[in-house]
Image (tube, rainbow, N blue to C red):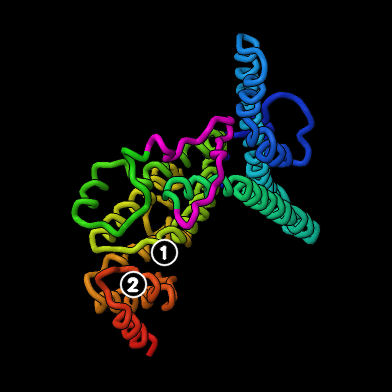
């Protein structure tokens, strides 16, 4: 919690006056109401009324209030983290003063134990901060999943409905709609030479998706302390990775398609690392450890890019010994069966050997 917290004092992140009790409640209220409506509500009212300066002023005013609401909500989350950090420092300073200025006596030890009780307060604030961020992530995840659905293209009837996702400032999050289909590609890894070349010069679904995720969460992320911004990014990345895995399992793969998948997952990981502040999460290993769903995508990529089934067996065995393999044998069987150049019977034989 030292990262970024030392630059903020309790209460300084809160904007304006008002009741600041029940930290985090305002953030959830905002995320579920104002942010969900955003400028669309003003635009809808404007469509049935006068179009002129009054409506423009209303839209501008709502945008200003929305930006303020985002900052105030983020400040509530920040203050929970800050108060935990300052309470921890207070405990440490008290203990230093006791050691320096009080004699070694029974009463002194009782005083020391009393001060050490502040560690329980620190833990309560830390848990409250963690729960608050988990709730915030749960509010944002449905829109993040919708972005994935729209970016990967229609599959099994699609899902998403007519209304697109919006960011915390109320503006629409742009995804690959009808106008973009001529110059962009949906998720498809059953690629021949021509399709692979087209995928290299076209806007891929993964770039579209990451751009839309930026529009969704950046207005909130920029106001959060670095640690909380990282927690938000990891949480959203986890939900996105799960939805991506479900979409990937519906595509057939050629060897060229597997190479394309590797490029896409690398793009996603670099996107995440570019937006994470903690140096400890800047490597692929630590990032995957922090986000198990992303780790599964990385393992799927390795599995789909093997040259032959014997290489797949070696990959699984070595990775299991290193303790960085989460895919079950049934998962591996299902995924390898998606490779159009692998025979299903041989895939089954491979897994039988591995089980033994």
| Horizontal arrangement in the rendering, residue 204 relative to residue 229 (left or right) | left
Image quadrant where residue 110 sits: bottom right
Q: Can residue 99 be seen in this view?
A: no
Residue 300 location (% of width, % of height): 37, 65
Residue 132 located left or right of residue 198: right
Residue 209, image x, y percentages: 43, 44
Q: Name the residue under label 1.
A: 249
Main SS, magenta residues = loop
Q: Distance between the residues labelled 2 and 1?
A: 10 Å
101 or 329: nearer the viewer? 329
Q: Residues within 10 Å of mark 1 (few under 14, many from 20)?
A: some
SS at circle 1: loop
Tell me if residue 9 comes above or below residue 190 in the rendering.
Answer: above
Mark 2 sits on what residue?
A: 336
User: What segment is highlighted magenta in the picture?
Assistant: 155-180
Q: Residues within 10 Å of mark 2 (few under 14, many from 20)?
A: many
The residue sitting at the bottom extreme is 356
Closest to the observer: 355 or 79?
Answer: 355
């Amino acid at each position: 919690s030292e990262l970024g917290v030392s630059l903020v004092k309790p209460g300084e992140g809160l904007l304006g006056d008002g009741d600041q009790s029940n930290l985090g409640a305002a953030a959830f209220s905002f995320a579920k109401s104002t942010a969900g409506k955003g400028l669309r509500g003003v635009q809808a009212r404007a469509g049935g009324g006068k179009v002129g300066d009054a409506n423009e002023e209303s839209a501008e005013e709502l945008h200003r209030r929305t930006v303020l609401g985002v900052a105030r909500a983020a400040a509530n989350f920040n203050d929970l983290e800050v108060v935990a950090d300052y309470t921890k420092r207070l405990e440490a300073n008290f203990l230093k003063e006791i050691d320096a200025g009080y004699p070694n006596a029974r009463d002194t030890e009782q005083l020391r134990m009393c001060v050490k009780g502040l560690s329980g307060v620190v833990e309560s604030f830390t848990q409250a901060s963690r729960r608050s961020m988990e709730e915030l992530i749960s509010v944002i995840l449905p829109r993040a999943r919708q972005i994935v659905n729209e970016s990967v293209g229609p599959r099994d009837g699609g899902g998403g409905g007519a209304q697109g996702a919006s960011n915390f400032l109320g503006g629409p999050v742009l995804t690959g709609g009808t106008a973009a289909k001529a110059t962009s590609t949906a998720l498809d890894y059953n690629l021949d030479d021509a399709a692979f070349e087209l995928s290299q010069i076209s806007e891929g679904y993964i770039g579209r998706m990451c751009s839309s995720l930026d529009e969704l969460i950046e207005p909130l992320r920029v106001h959060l302390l670095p640690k909380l911004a990282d927690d938000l990014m990891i949480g959203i990345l986890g939900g996105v990775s799960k939805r991506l895995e479900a979409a990937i399992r519906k595509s057939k793969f050629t060897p060229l398609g597997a190479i394309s998948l590797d490029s896409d997952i690398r793009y996603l990981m670099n996107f995440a690392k570019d937006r994470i502040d903690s140096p400890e999460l800047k490597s692929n290993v630590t990032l995957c450890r922090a986000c198990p769903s992303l780790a599964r995508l990385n393992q799927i990529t390795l599995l789909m890019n093997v040259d032959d089934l014997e290489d797949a067996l070696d990959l699984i065995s070595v990775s299991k010994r290193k303790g960085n393999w989460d895919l079950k044998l049934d998962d591996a069987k299902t995924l390898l069966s998606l490779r159009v150049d692998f025979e299903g019977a041989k895939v089954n034989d491979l897994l039988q050997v591995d089980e033994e």
